[in-house]
Image: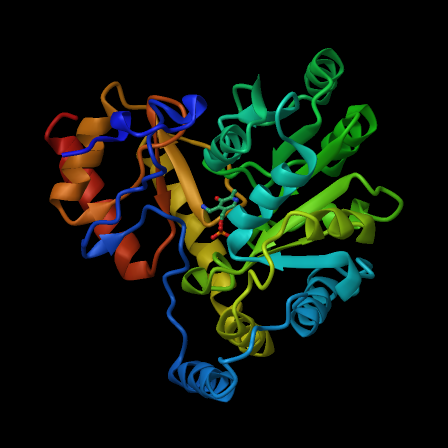
Amino acid sequence: MTSLGDLPLRDDLRGREPYGAPQLDVPYALNTNENPYPPSDRLVKALGEAVMDVAGTLNRYPDRDAVALRADLAAFLNADTPGAGLDGRRVWAANGSNEIIQQILQAFGGTGRTALGFEPSYSMHPIITGVSGTRWLNAFRDDDFGIDPVRAVAAIEGHQPDIVFLTSPNNPTGTALPPAVIEAVLDAAPGMVVVDEAYAEFRREGTPSALTLLDGRPRLIVTRTMSKAFAMAGTRLGYLAADPAVIDALLLVRLPYHLSAVTQAVARTALAHGAELLGGVEALRRDRDAIVAWLRAEGFRVADSDANFVLFGTFPDRHAVWEALLARGVLIREVGPPEWLRVSVGTPGEMDAFRTALTEALKEGL
Ligand code: PMP
């Protein structure tokens, strides 16, 4: 049997583990921040018809620049954030926002370059950074999981990173960043600033999107995804808004025809049904606020959340709690600071199951 160690793998990949949120077949999957509401029958039919329409053309490559899809995404962002003033030339799309982040690192990172993030945050930022040959630098968040602008600016001035990652709302803490923090980082950063807004549609009232900061700032990139609020994780469609020059840079590294004709057709159909797909967001925000209130009433520490998940704790042995929930069919995520756990907001029935399982687990003295 050949093992990985026998192969001439790149030295800097030796000893690494593949990304692996467990994909288990459980009754209540509350571990990957998916939207629990599947497409309606009407939308399933429309998606099927859209795939049928492109099926007869699959002997041809897709539109390499996904022009129509990018125009649709720009229209969506303009509706989401009034005043964003975007068009298709300022929007780029790829297979999930993970691929967007990979393309950003390929274009702006690489050997001899650095990327800086504020942890705890999304674990794929340092992973994709490392795989691209870029060195990862960690600046820490505050105890309340926010980012203090004075400390952030000091870290950036000290390290002079080529790329800065800000995640807002942050995964796994749910914390949204005030625009003043993003502006302070933009003013201090010598290179690109990526604001990962995968969960933006779930934010509470009063926190504007970083899209409002794009005008006149060609080093700012705002990334979004259809995997969360849009309930299309299976489609694999992520996107960004930035200056057209940033997109010129990404065109240098993207693989030709990276977005399949099926992906483009499905994503455009989903966008055409955007109001319906995003219809679940209000309920998810309400149910998120309800689970935060319940956990606090039960005496847990809970991070304020602007996302579709909640980080709570603290547990001396979080793995035991995670296992006790799994034994009751509820899969949540062991992620973030060592004593905390993260639960995604599911349907009301799923949240009932979570509450019951956690209450029972704690009666066992965990
Ligand atoms: N950014 C953040 C902060 C995330 O939490 C995730 C998914 N967990 C992603 C990006 C990637 O999502 P996708 O590739 O499905 O767009």
Residue 164 or residue 121, whichever sits in front: 164
Q: Is residue 140 visible?
A: no
Residue 77 or residue 104, whichever sits in front: 104
Q: Residue at x 53, y 74 (%)?
A: 261
Instruction: Decide if residue 323 is on the left or right side of residue 233.
Output: left
Residue 156: which quarter of the image?
A: top right
Residue 228 or residue 234, whichever sits in front: 234
Q: Is residue 89 above or below residue 6?
A: below
Q: Is residue 13 visible?
A: yes
For the rendered model, the colour scheme is: rainbow
Quadrant where the N terminus sits is top left
Residue 193: which quarter of the image?
A: top right
- Give the percent coordinates (x, y) of residue 260: 52, 68
Residue 4: which quarter of the image?
A: top left
Residue 226 or residue 336, whichever sits in front: 226
Q: Residue at x 40, y 79 (%)?
A: 40
Q: Residue at x 64, y 67 (%)?
A: 64
| Extreme-top residue of the structure | 158
Q: Is residue 307 above or below residue 262?
A: above
- Give the percent coordinates (x, y) of residue 221: 71, 44
Quadrant where the C terminus sits is top left
Q: Residue at x 13, y 32 (%)?
A: 363
Instruction: Decide if residue 158 is on the left or right side of residue 123.
Output: right
Number of numbered tags placed on the structure image: 0
| Extreme-right residue of the structure | 216
